[in-house]
Image: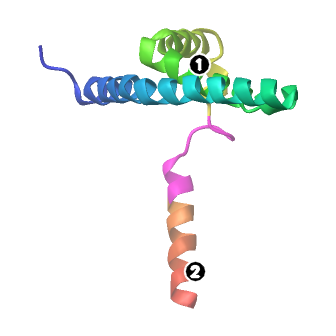
Amino acid sequence: TTAEPDERQAAMQIAWTREFLKYFGTFCGLAAVVLTTGAIKRKNPAVLLPIFPLTFAFSNHYGMGCGTLLQRIKGEVENILDTQSTLLELPKGPLTFEDLEKIRISQSNSSTEK
């Protein structure tokens, strides 16, 4: 099957994320072991604090690589398109030809004044 360019790009992003997870997961695991050991040796639980942002970053990438994040995003996109389409409207409505002409004229006037 031949994928569309957008599908191919999305598949590349997912594949890259899966590959990245292998290395980042290893780093997070080693960091957890080292930080836990440091917290025990120093008797200071504050040493464990860097685990929290690492966990959030790992779970975000995991969701992207496994597709769960993409499914949630697709569901939210469909919800916005179906029930909240007013969020997608441009301020002051869509651009008209007259609006574009005013912009073009003002830009040409400002470039000739220089």
| Rendered position, 31 above or below 105 | above
| Rendered position, 93 above or below 28 | below
Q: Given the image, on which type of amino acid does mark 2 rest?
A: Ser
| Rendered position, 72 above or below 21 | above
* Residue placed most toward the observer, 82 or 110: 82
Locate residue 43, reporting x and y percent. 87, 27
Q: What residue is rendered at 56% in x and 27% in y?
A: 30
Locate residue 47, reporting x and y percent. 80, 32
Magenta-highlighted stretch: main secondary structure? loop
| Rendered position, 77 above or below 48 | above
- Circle count: 2
Magenta-colored stretch includes residue 93: yes
Provide the residue designation for mark 1. 59
Split into 4 quadrants, where in the image is the N terminus?
top left
Split into 4 quadrants, where in the image is the C terminus?
bottom right
Q: What element carries label 1?
A: helix
Taking the image as shown, residue 10 lies to the left or right of residue 113, namely: left
Taking the view exactly as shown, the residue that stands out farthest to the left is 1
* Residue placed most toward the observer, 106 or 38: 38
Q: What residue is rendered at 57% in x and 89% in y?
A: 113
Locate residue 25, reporting x and y percent. 50, 23
Taking the view exactly as shown, the residue that stands out farthest to the bottom is 114
Colour scheme of the picture: rainbow
Q: Magenta region: which residues?
A: 90-100
Q: In which quarter of the image is residue 75?
A: top right
Q: In which quarter of the image is residue 39?
A: top right
Q: Given the image, on which type of amino acid does mark 1 rest?
A: Ser
Return the mark for residue 110. Answer: 2
